[in-house]
Image (tube, rainbow, N blue to C red):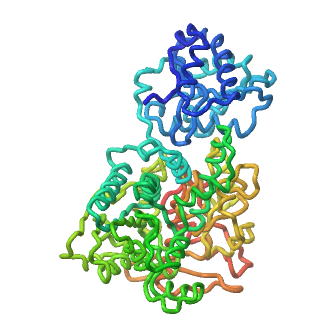
Amino acid sequence: MERAYYSASIERFVATNSDEIFGILAGQDSFAIRPENREAWKHEIEILKPILSNYSGKVYFEYAIPRMGKRIDALVVIANVLFILEFKVGEKEHTGYARDQVWDYALDLKNFHETSHNLFIAPVLIATKASDKPIFLSQSIQNDDVLFPILCNPNTLSLAIDNCLSYCDSGNIDITAWEDGRYQPTPTIIEAATVLYNGHSVEDISRSDASAINLAETSSALADIIGKSQREGVKSICFVTGVPGAGKTLVGLNIANQFRDQDNALYSVYLSGNQPLVSVLIEALTRDKYQKEKETGQDVTKGEIRKDVRSFIQIIHHFRDECLRDWRRPPIEHVTLFDEAQRAWDLISTRNFMARKKNRPDFEVSEPEYLISCMDRHQDWAVIVCLVGGGQEINTGEAGIGEWIDALDRTYRHWHIHISPQLSDEEYAAAGSLDKLNGRPHVYYQNELHLAVSMRSFRAENVSLLVKQILDLDVPGASQTLDLLRDKYPIVITRDLRKAKKWLRTQARGSERYGLVVSSQAERLKPHAIFVKHEVNPVHWFLNDKEDVRSSYYLEDVASEFMIQGLELDWVCVTWDADFRIKTETSPEGNLQSWDHWSFRGDRWQRILKEARQQYLKNAYRVLLTRARQGMVIVVPEGEPNDHTRPPEFYDPIWDYLCSIGFVVI
């Protein structure tokens, strides 16, 4: 598929009639052309023709960036430079938003386009009514041959091009080889949901590493199971596993979007008990769709769009409550996808909730068993997809994936079961329940149902392994893994929160998002102006821009593991409190280290004794340490000798431990 609406050698572009070029552009656009688009294209053609007549290379108009669901106004290849040109026709100023926009395009190609990784990329922002200003060229601290955005107008664009050509190494890009390069994006979950909702497939926005089971393969396996279940009139349940950040949610959203056809009774829905995740995704899709509709002249309201979005993504409790209204009536969906299925409530939590909130004291099944019963009401066929995370339980009352299997064994023996072989691994805590399926018919183990490689960090795939080794107190292993990550994924440590904030702002480019995250038990960070109990709106924190004090960019409000689980940032600052400490004990074998678990109550720390709560705290730090796509800084406060709630001896062992692994100190 052609990625640009129009492409041609510079010589051909210059020689071609402008109306002919415009006609090609207009013919490629599937939407009605608005007058401002028409005028913008004409201005861009008129501006570029005389300027590019002095160069050789190739020009592309409306070059697609699928991960972002957008298009570059013009991309020009000259000598050894990729020029990303963003025009703001009629604008007198180079706004911060526009600078981030053109920078994002450049970074997208650098990071995700195979044959652009090692090229010199110049993002250029042209405000057509701006006054003449000097042209400045500079690189960021990453020193990766992506320039800071160059600000110019039509009069100074030629000078900007000449300066870039003089600045970079001599040579010429092999344009044919460059065009043949694969685009291998790793979108954020917000970007992915937006692009899928707009009609793209998972293949458009996913990587295709030969070493990983491709997201498309997992999606294809699930699609085959759904199709077969419909054809044969059977009920099937699938258990999809994956390491943190491997793309389980992306697979769920892809299937939910793929099977939304109500006319053919393939209506599906993505369900999650993660309220912040659902709220953020619904608002992100609503804003994006609203903007697109307004751009095409459609008269719609956000309320109308939000209603449609909620048929695609729902909080699981709404689905549950709808099914409660009539115990016999099946839901309208034939396919339900439960994200983080292991977090569904056990019998006691479900029973207590139903008695307290729903006036149903007779409720005697766990949430997994009840959810299966809802789909079992269908007379013909149904499919449940359970997306299972390992080692991420952070709430009391979570049943674990074993309860789903136990419910199938107790009550729903007619269901077909498709299982990832990795579900037997210790981190999923389901091995005992799986034994009950031995000898049962229609149980299928499928390798395609496991996502083995974390894709949250496109810079390095071993981040989840490093975090596991840190939490397992495996210093040799963590040191070795850290060495593999150093050049791709920066992780630094500090005892100064101000330095950490400065580091975040320095690392981030364009609209790359950064923010502060802490454990929900981190109550003694108040002296550092970190108030974990302050209620934060996740929609504002994750979606609002740099000018909004409520956004993550402001580095004032913090997210805990409950708000950030399932979501991600480009750059993260994890501030470590005394709730999760290092304890050293002397034994005949030497000093032994272990984690010490604490909760702050009233005016003092209280030791956490229950093993389950200890695991929840450990998992909370696992969540916090695996949220960054590009890099992170870890802050360990120095403590205060005169404050009995945060003396240095609480924090120094944590600092010494991280230093022993070999993290760079700032």
- Residue 619 in percent (x, y) is at 49, 71
- Residue 487 in percent (x, y) is at 48, 45
Residue 388 in view in this figure? yes
Which of the pair 314/600 is nearer the observer?
314
- Seen in the picture, residue 120 relative to 13 is either above or below; the reply is below
- Seen in the picture, residue 370 relative to 24 is either above or below; the reply is below
> Residue drawn at (45%, 56%), measured in percent from left and top?
262
- The quadrant in which residue 259 appears is bottom left
- Residue 477 in percent (x, y) is at 39, 61
> Residue drawn at (58%, 81%), measured in percent from left and top?
598
Which of the pair 220/79 is nearer the observer?
220
> Residue drawn at (48%, 30%), measured in percent from left and top?
3
Which of the pair 48/461 is nearer the observer?
48
- The quadrant in which residue 296 appears is top right
- Residue 99 in percent (x, y) is at 69, 36
- The quadrant in which residue 89 appears is top right
